[in-house]
Image (cartoon, rainbow, N blue to C red):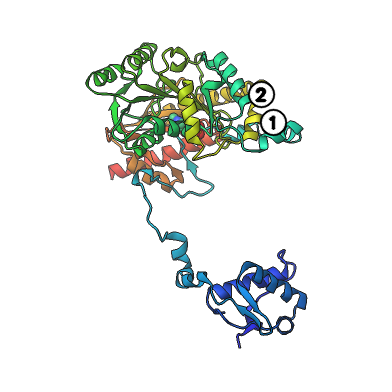
Amino acid sequence: MFPYKTSFILQRNQGSPLYLQLANQFIELIKSHKLPPKTKLPSSRKLSELLEVHRKTVVACYEELLLQGWIESVPKKGTYIKATLPILQQQEFLEEEDVQSTCANFSFEKRAILERKTYETEEDWVVLDDGISDVRLTPLEDIARTYRRLSTKRSTINALTYGSTMGNYKLRSVLADYLNETRGLQCCEQNILITRGSQMGLFLSSKLLLQEDDIVVVGETNYIAADVSFLERKAQLIRVPVDENGLDTCKIEELCKKQTIKAVFVTSHHHHPTTVTLSAERRIHLLNLAKEYQFAIIEDDYDYDFNYNHAPILPLASHDTHGNVIYIGSFCKTVAPVFRIGYLIAPKEFVDEAAKARRYIDRQGDALLELVFVDFLKSGDLDRHIKKILKEYQSRRDLFCQLLKEELGTYFEFEIPKGGMAVWTKLNQKYSWDEVSQIARKHKLEIGDWQRYDYENIGHNAIRIGFASMNEIEIQRLIKRLKTTMQELDINEHN
Ligand SMILES: Cc1ncc(COP(=O)(O)O)c(C=O)c1O
């Protein structure tokens, strides 16, 4: 007979009721074929004696197994493992647990282009980022308080069901006023699709605009996730130089004369990665070209709120009178990356279509969070938060740049960025980031994927180093480790 007594381990006070523990262990035995189909099970009285549990426990377990279809009861004969269990055909597969959890037994497309490097670090490591906010400064208390207050409001119930794929109407309307006032746009709620961050805006724009082999113009250095989004659509990227005035629009004009351009991607406020601002002249030039050659300008205004030396420069979208600009932004940098609220602003017919496409990847946004942001914008809390972090990030930028110059000026060249959250840091051509990152790891400093800044191998030898996420002590620690790294590199060179 099957060794029932030794095959089950039942734990009282474990949280899960005994009958369920017993049923689940039965299921495992059935799946692994240790209890094959047609096996007769002991009566409930007998099994309860063997396992020293109450008979009701075994009865409840058998009822559960019956309900789930693992066993069957044959009148006047007893209880049996069900004779026809299709799952038993997978027995060999299930035994190889590793195989099951890693390998799919069906074919699907794997795209090398989506590959991202990951790095293992420990808590006491310094890890460079490319310019992200300091989440410790997130106004979490305010957000949580508003969330709690709204959750208890009767009218909020309406937001719990399936809603518009466009996003909450109130947020679209408040956002339209906010952006018109602060960024000189002339939009209304019909021009706004609430997204889950800028990346979704980029994804949807690429999906709607691009077919295989369509041409998208991007900078010679560019935000890599934008490149990947376009390449995902099998579009062709044509790169134009980026100098201290941003994208070279004369080169774009030359291209337009020769071929059909579908879109130009621009991070006009602070070019990603080099942080330069697209000059006024080039802004107008680009808008005129878009009008004449009828291409879309995808304007990714990822860090509009962060200006230290001057008033923010108005986006291209604010001067667009012909319906060429798709303006993308989010609160993910300003508040915290975890709050996935962004926006795509464009002519109504484009927004309508983007909202239709969105349904099939994300039925709708987080309507409750969207309501919280209505409050956040209307109450002035967002403006107060921006003022607070701006001051903090400015002093971090100043400290970082000062130390980088004083301590590491012989190794690195950079311009103090007028805004944003990162410094475009050029390493002296004598050295390579490959060597630097290898030695840095010995000193618990992770440089990260430096190659992604030079997708085209032009050899500029620069990377973005984010300063906003680090406080004073952390900036000092980073500089110290970077200095130790560079000094070790020098010693190695001399030996
Ligand atoms: C240039 C640029 N665009 C878009 C994004 C994506 O931002 P979000 O978190 O709003 O999706 C980032 C994030 O780092 C970025 O740097």
Question: Can you give x and y, in whole percent of width and height, for residue 176 in the image?
Answer: 57, 19
Q: Is residue 380 visible?
A: no
Q: Quadrant of the N terminus?
A: bottom right
Residue at 49% x, 33% y: name it: 356
Residue at 68% x, 21% y: name it: 379
Q: Nearer the viewer, residue 10 or 360?
A: 360
Question: Can you give x and y, in whole percent of width and height, for residue 416 in the image?
Answer: 43, 22
Q: Which residue is mark 1?
A: 142
Badge 2: few (under 14), some or many (20 or more) residues near its Cα, within 10 Å? some
Question: Can you give x and y, in whole percent of width and height, for residue 55 in the image?
Answer: 76, 78
- Please state which amino acid type lies under the numbered disc 1: Asp
Residue at 46% x, 37% y: name it: 129
- Please state which amino acid type lies under the numbered disc 2: Asp
Mark positioned earlier in the residue sequence (1 or 2): 1
Residue at 49% x, 40% y: name it: 361
Q: Which residue is mark 2?
A: 381
Q: Nearer the viewer, residue 345 or 487?
A: 345
Q: CA distance from mark 1 to mark 2?
A: 8 Å
- The reply to whether dot 1 and dot 2 touch (C-beta < 8 Å) is yes
